[in-house]
Amino acid sequence: MDNHPNSTRPFAPLVFIGLGLGWAAEEIVTLCASRLLVEELGLSAPLYLIYLPLFAFFGLLFAASKPIDRILEKPATSSIILGLGMLGILIIALMPHRAVCTIAGTVLFAASTASINVLWFVAFTALPLNLVRKAVLFTALITALGTFLWSLPDTALLVVAFVALGGSVLCYERVHAKWKPSSVRLSTAKPQHIDLSPRRLSAILGVCIIMMGFGFLQYTVYQFTPPAMPWSETISHVLSLALLGVSLYLARGAEFSFGAKLATTLTLFSFVLLAVSRDAMGVSVLLAAGVEGMLELIVLLALVEYAKRSSRSPFFIGGIWMMLTGLMQWLGCLLSLAEHAALPSLSYSMFGLAIVALLIVDAVWLLNDTTVTAFLWEQKPSESTALPDRTPFEDRAAAVARAHKLTARETEVMELFAKGRSATYIAESFCVSNNTVRSHILHLYAKCDVHSRQELITLIDGWPDDSGPLSH
């Protein structure tokens, strides 16, 4: 019997919109705080240089402190987190012309959103992966839709953020009540660490560098050059959504990832354009933002898959994700400050040229389609190899697979299918589509000359422990 009953369906909308509402609220509040700080101080530097390291600090706190994990798991904690975020929004809204109050409200809000992010990450580790993939896609969609509201006055925007933050926490509470973090597992295998091959490590390093590059571009555009076009944020979010959809659904199961090729090509084009003309930085940051948003959500999904199979606490893994996201973008902001101090004009200093060259090398060597595809779809350890003691049935199934020359994945599918697992369960276990699993089943039917699950079970049960099938 599968671990994921049909009762997941009524709760699916809550899973889809929960994290997206939190991210939309986060973007709206930081936008309003930036506007207020520009009016009060003449520059938005304090927001970037305070909010991002705070976000990274809270991520480190969640990763390193087990007592905080236990506190976050308590039912009443989400209400306290919500109250903290709402208090931060109220301080920003009620005292808009005091920079100290704006920064204080932003600090409170950062503590709240960081906590909400890690809570949603832990909740995702308890959900079926098909549901999580759709939730990640809807997160990008809701965040993109939120940018259409940015032309509203700050007061109206803060009211929207207030409601969205409450909605995110309410959705989390309902989802958490249904699925505890330890109540659902996609695999019966013992928790294990997924091997990080050199290609996967290259992709991780490449993602970190592009996050740093995005921080560099974003800070330079918003601080030292004329403001970007008002609709540029919407375009970058829609681009991120399109790239994410292609990577998760259209290119899945293929020998190469078309989505990864699109993302890496746009990354390279963005940075080459930046190197050719600094006047084109607005377009460059638009493309880089779309790719960075897609990769940030892809990394989130990959870490959820890792957390499901790892013996590490999901709070630790989610905290590391938040820490790296905030830290790398903050480092990019600092590099932008350093570059502008070296040559405060529309020309590049040698330092600025070195940064752009690093980003181009990153796009070519570290973040190419091969490393991204390996990071996303590289074969995970199978259930059968994860279990230390194999049953006689599994040994006979392996003998059948060898005799009929099944591939490694067809063998894994056959063992689970013969045990009564559904195509949906197998698809979620191996992070592939249902159509891919059905294709594997048809192939093994043809190779084994059987026509149903029962005939396959009969074949395996009747297979001897040594060589060929039993004579009839």
Image (cartoon, rainbow, N blue to C red):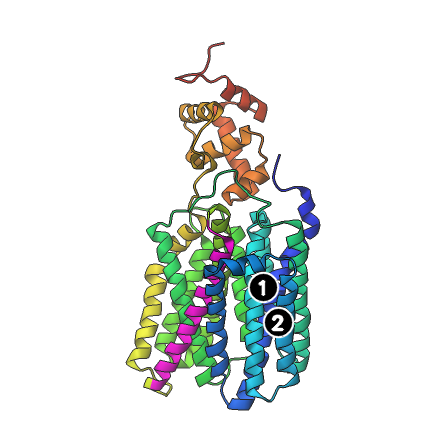
Pick whichever, 190 or 398, lies toward us: 190
Q: Residue furthest top?
A: 472
Q: Nearer the viewer, residue 442 or 215?
A: 215
Q: Position of residue 354 (x, y in %)?
A: 30, 74
Q: Which span is picked out in magenta? A: 312-341
Q: Residues within 10 Å of mark 1 (few under 14, many from 20)?
A: many
**Label 1: element kind:** helix
> Residue type at mark 1?
Ile
Pointers 2 and 1 in contact (CB under 8 A)?
A: yes
Q: What x and y, as percent, mark residue 56?
A: 46, 68
Q: Main secondary structure of the magenta part?
A: helix
Q: Earlier in the sequence, mark 2 or mark 1?
A: 2
Task: Identify the residue at horizontal 50%, vertical 30% (top origin).
Answer: 415
Which residue is located at x 43 percent, y 44 percent? 379
The answer to which of 327 and 264 lies nearer the viewer is 327
Q: Is residue 112 above or below residue 223?
A: above
- Callout 2 amino acid: Gly
- Spot occupied by residue 460 in the image (x, y as percentages of width and height): 50, 21
Q: Is residue 303 left or right of residue 157?
A: left
Q: Is residue 408 magenta?
A: no
Q: Is residue 231 visible?
A: no
Horizontal relation, residue 326 to residue 30: left or right: left
Disc sitting over residue 45 in the figure = none
Q: Which residue is labeled 1 in the image? A: 116
Tag 2, which secondary structure?
Answer: helix
Indicate yes or no whether the magenta region holds residue 316. Answer: yes
Instruction: Work out whether 351 lies above or below 79.
Output: below
Which quadrant of the rendered structure holds the N terminus? top right
Between 291 and 5, the one nearer to me in the picture: 5
**Residue under circle 2?**
85
Q: Identify the image quadrant of residue 260.
A: bottom left
